[in-house]
Image: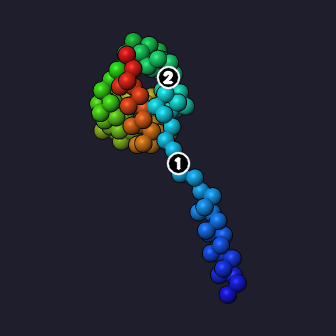
């Protein structure tokens, strides 16, 4: 009987000590997920001329593009680099990045 109480107590202690996950802001994620490496620190000066400028992009459009690249729906031959890193970015993070990009000039 005491064993049940110990297990139950440990479970409750673990729940009390848990902290909710707070999404990071888009600017932090843009750096952390290495987006800046190709799209520029300001999201407006890409490494190569054929890479898109992302600053000021519509948030819904940017989010849809990221999701399509991650899932493979968008595969126009220029998405290989992004496809290689999109597995590191979840949907919540993509939305935060897209929202941040839309607020840039």
Q: Identify the residue shown where x is 63% and y is 58%.
A: 17
Image quarter for residue 95?
top left
Characterize the local packing of mark 2: few (<14), some (14-19) or many (20 or more) Cα atoms within 10 angstroms: some
Characterize the local packing of mark 1: few (<14), some (14-19) or many (20 or more) Cα atoms within 10 angstroms: few
Q: Nearer the viewer, residue 80 or 102?
A: 102
Q: Position of residue 59 (x, y in %)?
A: 32, 30
* Residue at image mark 2: 36
Q: Position of residue 84 (x, y in %)?
A: 47, 34
* Residue at image mark 1: 21
| Above or below 101: residue 7 | below
Q: Identify the residue shown where x is 34% and y is 34%.
A: 63
Q: Residue furthest bottom?
A: 1
Q: Position of residue 69 (x, y in %)?
A: 36, 35
C-beta proximity under 8 Å, tags 2 and 1: no
For the question of whether residue 74 can be seen, the reply is: no
* Number of numbered discs overlaid on the protein picture: 2
Image quarter for residue 15?
bottom right
Q: Nearer the viewer, residue 78 or 21?
A: 21
Which quadrant is the N terminus positioned in?
Answer: bottom right
Q: Identify the residue shown where x is 52% and y is 30%.
A: 28
For the question of whether residue 70 can be seen, the reply is: yes
Q: Nearer the viewer, residue 49 or 54?
A: 54
For the residues labelled 2 and 1, the Cα–Cα distance comes to: 24 Å
| Above or below 12: residue 1 | below
| Above or below 100: residue 4 | below
Which quadrant is the C terminus positioned in?
Answer: top left
Secondary structure at badge 1 equals: loop
Q: Position of residue 31 (x, y in %)?
A: 53, 27
């Amino acid at each position: 009987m005491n064993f049940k109480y110990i297990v139950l107590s440990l479970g409750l202690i673990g729940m009390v000590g848990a902290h909710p996950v707070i999404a990071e802001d888009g600017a932090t994620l843009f750096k952390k997920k290495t987006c800046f490496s190709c799209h520029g620190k300001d999201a407006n000066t890409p490494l190569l001329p054929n890479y898109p400028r992302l600053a000021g992009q519509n948030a819904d459009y940017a989010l849809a593009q990221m999701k399509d690249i991650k899932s493979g729906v968008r595969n126009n031959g220029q998405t290989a680099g992004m496809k290689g890193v999109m597995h590191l970015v979840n949907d919540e993070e993509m939305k935060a990045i897209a929202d941040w990009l839309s607020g840039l000039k």
